[in-house]
Amino acid sequence: MHYTGRFAPSPTGPLHFGSLLAAVGSYCDARAAGGRWLLRMEDIDAPRAMPGASDQILRQLEAYGLAWDGPVLYQSTRGDEYLAALEQLQAQGDVFWCRCSRTELARLGTGVYPGTCRAFTTPRSDAAIRLRVPEGITSFKDVVFGPQEESVARQTGDFVLRRRDGLFSYQLAVVVDDAAQGVTRVVRGADLLDNTARQIVLQQRLGLASPTYLHLPLAVHADGSKLSKQTHAAPLPVPASPGLLRQALQRLGQTLLPPEEAASCADILSAGVANWDPRRVRVEARMAPGETQSS
Ligand SMILES: [Zn+2]
């Protein structure tokens, strides 16, 4: 099957060094395989979106030479497709309508949905829609993290596909969009590793092929805390900093050209693609003490 990869940022703010790792990793993995690299804006959660962030992200990717194929897919335009998937699941008897409150579920203290509302298999108002998760073990082999196994029924339980306020869930949107875009390999940050089994369960219920998965180490501070918008990681500078691009590839365990041979982002990226070896990606990408992501 021809390789199709993607980068799927959420426009809750500009890209930072942590998001550059995911972008560079998925870009190099796709281009090294001669594959397509698509861009999807995960702007489904309108209340959390930051005005202007989508355009800022596009400008940042362009500045670093991360050129995507085809039009950008915006999740905010995909409501009809998500609804169609929900209707298919409803017709199969795979969903139910849940009115349990967050407080009620939190009181259980398990983090696992207990199946309280499973009998409500027809629509009712003011309710979330959950997937009836079948018993069984979901397993997959991550390219970096190796074989993974999870019982979604035991570890998460019936998960939400559409929230009570009408917002489609991340899991539903990702699964529907990966299939619609023909994605064959998902390369993304390891913070999403534990979402993968849920997505595979959903793919199976929808009769969709599962892509292969490669999770990249998260950039963490020297103390082990994650670099993120929440910890105020600096936005990637534009015009681009070739040094940051080199750092990203280095963090991913890749072989670098000597500095004097790779002055521009284009040079660094094309060398990154030519030398890309996913076996060299390490499970952790810890920043050295005192090192900043904005050098
Ligand atoms: Zn419920």
Image (cartoon, grey):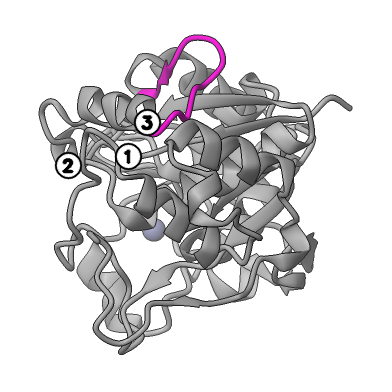
Residue hosting label 3: 61
Q: Residue furthest front?
A: 260
* Distance in Å between CA atoms under marks 3 and 1: 14 Å
- Residue type at the position of mark 3: Leu
- Image position of 239 (left or right of 76): left
Q: Give residue 217's position: percent from left, percent from top.
A: 53, 67
Residue 73 location, quadrant: top left
Residue hosting label 1: 10
Comparing labels 3 and 1, the label whose residue is closer to the camera:
3
Q: Residue at x 21, y 28 (%)?
A: 56
Label 3: few (<14), some (14–19) or many (≥20) C-alpha neighbours in 10 Å: many
Vertical comparison of 290 with 63: above or below: below
Q: Is residue 40 among the parts visible in the rendering? A: yes
Tell me the tag on residue 163: none
Q: Residue at x 38, y 39 (%)?
A: 9
- The residue nearer to you, when weighing 168 against 289, is 289
Label 1 residue SS: loop
Q: Give residue 153's position: percent from left, percent from top.
A: 63, 67
Q: In which quadrant will I find the N terminus?
A: top right
- The residue nearer to you, when weighing 86 against 100, is 86
Labels 3 and 2: the sequence-earlier one: 2
Vertical comparison of 271 with 255: above or below: above
Q: Quadrant of ligand 1?
A: bottom left
* Distance in Å between CA atoms under marks 1 and 2: 9 Å
Residue 41 location, quadrant: top left
Q: Give residue 124's position: percent from left, percent from top.
A: 35, 35
Residue hosting label 2: 48
Assign the magenta stretch its main secondary structure: loop
For the record, the magenta segment spans 64-75
- The residue nearer to you, when weighing 267 against 70, is 267
Q: Residue at x 21, y 43 (%)?
A: 237
